[in-house]
Amino acid sequence: TLNNRLGYMKSLFNELHRLGDIDYPNPLAKVRPLRLQERPLSFLSNAQVTELLQTFDTYPNCEHLALIARVCLATGARWGEAQGLAPERVKNGAVTFANTKSRRTRSIPIHPDLERALLDYFKAHGPFPNCIRHFSRVLDSTSIKLPRGQATHVLRHTFASHFVITGGNILTLQKVLGHASVTMTMRYAHLAPDHLQDALRRNPIFDTFSTPT
């Protein structure tokens, strides 16, 4: 939060200087962001995904929540991106996310069954309502326990984690998630089945060792 605010304040002073409202340099230009200990990213197991979706499907008046959750799990979208989907952005076997955090529009393929369910919902009910608080309420009724602050974002982490675990390419994942830098995406790299194994095989003395029996 502090680093985000620092970024906003730097941008504010830069814009004021550009507009000529101030004639002195940005006083925060040399202030560096805090270096924070990265927290482990929680993600759901297959069993937990099944439990969560079954809870959504049986919870009263939660059809929209169940669909938004499925979009997040199927595409790696943030909750707000999935919740903001409009009917015209669901077509040709894909969903298109606009007004994203990175300001980049991206289209992700989805299963025909999910596409059909989304279009049927929009035809019957119109756009999704704002329902992020209801998600937390439903989550609390399951056996799933998450670290503070990782509620709806766990769906995005779950998509990314399972993508890598099953052998997905990290650069493809970067594009799917809409990360501006691959540095963010590399947080999931350690989950790859062959993570760092090239360090074992691709070194100049590998061939000097005897073959394991």
Image: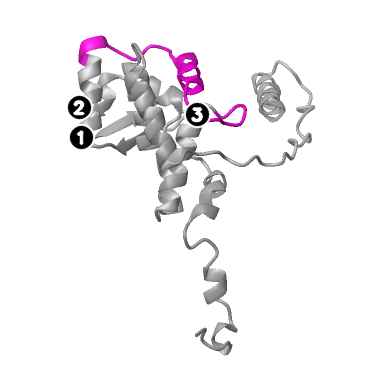
Q: What kind of residue is marked 1?
A: Pro
Q: Is residue 46 above or below residue 155?
A: below
In the picture of the structure, the residue carrying the numbered disc 3 is 143
Q: Is residue 132 above or below residue 110?
A: above
| Residue in the image at 44% along x and 52% along y | 165
Other-residue count near label 1 (Cα within 10 Å), few / some / many at <14 / 14–19 / ≥20 = few
Residue furthest to the front = 143
| Residue in the image at 33% along x and 19% along y | 58
Q: Position of residue 139 (x, y in %)?
A: 48, 23
How far apart are the two marked residues, 2 and 3, measured between alpha carbons?
Answer: 30 Å
Q: Which residues are magenta?
A: 123-150
Relative side of 41 to 94, left or right: right
In the rendered structure, does residue 128 fall within the stretch colored magenta? Answer: yes
Q: What kind of residue is marked 3?
A: Ser
Helix, strand or loop under label 2: helix
Q: Nearer the viewer, mark 2 or mark 3?
A: 3
| Residue in the image at 53% along x and 27% along y | 151
Q: Are marks 1 and 2 in contact (CB under 8 Å)?
A: yes
Q: Position of residue 16 (x, y in %)?
A: 68, 19
In the picture of the structure, the residue carrying the numbered disc 1 is 112
Q: Give the camera-side residue of 22 and 123.
A: 123
Q: Give the camera-side residue of 113 and 55.
A: 55
Q: Are marks 1 and 3 in contact (CB under 8 Å)?
A: no
Q: Give the camera-side residue of 77 and 14.
A: 77
Q: Position of residue 160 (x, y in %)?
A: 45, 43
How far apart are the two marked residues, 1 and 3, measured between alpha carbons?
Answer: 30 Å
Please report whichever mark, 2 or 3, sits nearer to the chain's N-terminal start: 2
